[in-house]
Image: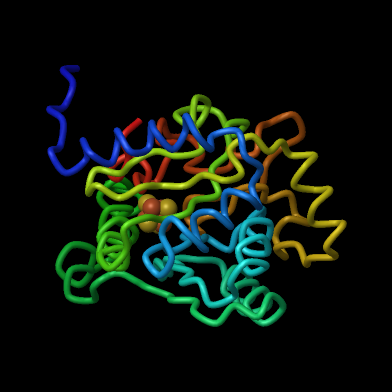
Amino acid sequence: MSALPPNPAQLPAAAEAARLNERYGEWDAAALLDLAIGRLFAGRIALVSSFGAESAVLLALAADIDPAVPVIFLDTGKLHPETLAYRDILTARLGLRDVRSVGPDAAALAQEDPEEWLWSDDPDRCCHLRKIVPLEAALRPFSAWITGRKRYQGGTRGALAAFDADTAGRIKLNPLVAWKPADIVAFLAARGLPRHPLQARNFLSIGCIPCTRAVRPGEDARAGRWPGRAKTECGIHLSLMSE
Ligand code: SF4
């Protein structure tokens, strides 16, 4: 497969991400968030959260710095009710003041997915309509965004740095990049934060209902996503990434 030509909007951001990695790439998560939310991108940064199995860590660390930081939550219309309930529980618990639930365009869904089988027929297109398009719109006012990706999750995330750039020229901050599963568990316990209700049923990475199953003993955390398919990412970090 031939490489895509570089997106001109991405080039300065990629260089800036490299510079930021050089200077701050080894800082811990709290310090990175303080730097980004409080100084580098003050008023111009949003956190994107799935309110999934590990999301409470990043949300709590960001709320420590500024509970009014904008948090974008993609409500695809196919989420588990437990995820929607967890969003509300964590929002109240952490005092988050600007959680923005965004979703797909109803007219586009009516035209392209009237029978609601697109997740089975063409999951990439389904993720595009339900996640990528709404996220692109929600991120338009911002010059940077924060993700919860970690290297231990493997795949395209295995070589992730603390800073990278998306194809629209925004900086992406990945403050938990070096965290391991044991760090997550220890942090949640130390803070006494509630776990996602499905975690108790061994859903360790939680997406839409048709595309998520519980993980079996010995499987990695993301093995329950798009089971039986080659697909491993919804595309948010593939279409909007520079890796
Ligand atoms: S995860 Fe599944 S249901 Fe959700 S948007 Fe992607 S393909 Fe559609």
Residue 203 sits above or below residue 139 on the image: above
| Horizontal and vertical percent position of residue 212 | 54, 50
Is residue 116 visible in the rendered image? The answer is no
| Residue ranking furthest to the top | 1
**Number of numbered discs present?**
0
Q: Is residue 108 left or right of residue 227?
A: left
| Horizontal and vertical percent position of residue 243 | 35, 30
Q: Quadrant of residue 135?
A: bottom left
| Horizontal and vertical percent position of residue 5 | 12, 27
Q: Is residue 159 left or right of residue 134?
A: right
Q: Quadrant of residue 91?
A: bottom right
Q: Is residue 199 left or right of residue 42?
A: right
Q: In front here: 56 or 34?
A: 34
Residue 64 sits above or below residue 93 on the image: above
Residue 168 sits above or below residue 5 on the image: below
Q: In front here: 146 or 2?
A: 146
Q: In front here: 223 or 52?
A: 52
Residue 217 sits above or below residue 133 on the image: above
On-image quarter of the N terminus: top left
Residue at x 63% of width, y 69% of height: 63
Q: Is residue 154 left or right of residue 239?
A: right
Residue at x 21% of width, y 35% of height: 11
Is residue 234 visible in the rendered image? The answer is yes
Q: How is the image coloured?
A: rainbow
Residue at x 23% of width, y 39% of height: 12
For ligand 1, the image quadrant comes to bottom left
| Horizontal and vertical percent position of residue 76 | 40, 66
